[in-house]
Image (cartoon, grey):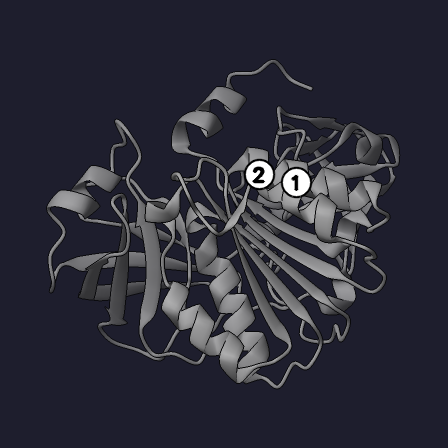
Amino acid sequence: MSYRVQIRGLDAEIDVEQGETILDAALRSGLAYPFGCQSGNCGACKSALLSGEVELAPYSEFALEDGERAQGLILGCRAMPWSDCEVALLDAEELEVHPSRVLNCRVVGLDDMTHDIKRVRLEIAEGAPLVFSAGQYASLEFPGFPGRDYSMANRPDDATLEFHIRLVANGAVTPHVRDRLKLGDTVRVKAPLGTSYWRRKHTGPILALAGGTGLAPIKSIVETALASGARQPISFYFGVRAERDLYLQDEFAALAAKHENLRIIPVLSEPDAGTSRRTGFLVEALRKDLAGIDGCKAYLAGPPIMVESCVKLLVELGMHRSDCLADAFYTEAEKQALARRTPA
């Protein structure tokens, strides 16, 4: 048995089998339905249910808040129709669709950025450069290991792909990256993924908020916006635990010296004694600094608790949730824990 689902924003109508999600059916039909994690964590496939009934499989409250669900929003990757339906994509006017590609790459750069973060640079072995929007991510597969998601840190016009990979305690993949990955090794890359990318038509102020390796997609967004001639104020907050967790500070200082509209604010939550930097949690720094958010868009990436607390604050201050382009970095263990929850 199947149900008929109309999708506004794609001008399409598809058949969705009973027990199948709307996203899976859309991708099976070759449609460019926006998606990211496909596990109910990121919110990239958030859509409006205009008519009909769906059942939602377990999902993160960050991806879909109770208030949003009460207003008729759903997640395409968790929504299984129980009748014919009509859904509408959000932000359809700013939707950027790039061909999904599977690339064979080789490692051309390995750098220790901090005590637990390694920068990995990849060169595409054959074929054209990857087309993506600043802020998107990829699934990386190292030979013999399961795929893991990492954001592109480079600008889309760079030929070399750059990723920042943090060691995860007891992780299945990151110890290999830290200890055994070497120059010349092959890596399979599936990209691009995600919808928390730079909105190029937006001309208002930009809040760029990164925690840890959330610096990667924020770096791509900030550098791309500036290289494209963006003149609006850009406030770039980078939250980490201590001084040793900061990286690429000289490069960003040089960028700020070149662009007077860029302001960079490192924030340390567990500072070493005697630091001259801002201290506390990133959300606390935001609360002290923000006098107004009219016309702002916020780009957020990093640990879920940092992303969720900052989004909550911005919404409390009057920012529309759709203007918070957020990418929370869930570990594989956190994703699996979510999947074991009882249905919502």
Q: Residue at (79%, 28%) from the top-left corner? A: 66
In the rendering, at what x and y percent does residue 193 appear? 50, 56
The disc at residue 284 is 1
Task: Tell me the kind of residue under disc 1.
Answer: Glu
Answer with left or right where residue 299 lies relative to residue 158.
right
Q: Residue at (32%, 49%) from the top-left corner? A: 165
Q: Answer whether labels 2 and 1 touch (C-beta < 8 Å).
A: yes
Q: Is residue 292 above or below residue 134?
A: above
In this view, the residue farthest toward the top is 342
In the rendering, at what x and y percent does residue 3 appear? 74, 37
Is residue 186 visible to the viewer in this orientation of the structure?
yes
The disc at residue 332 is none
Quarter containing the N terminus: top right
Answer with left or right where residue 89 lies relative to residue 260.
right
Q: Residue at (37%, 63%) from the top-left corner? A: 248
In this figure, which residue is indicated by the disc labeled 2? 281
Residue 69: quadrant of the picture: top right
Task: Tell me the kind of residue under disc 2.
Answer: Phe
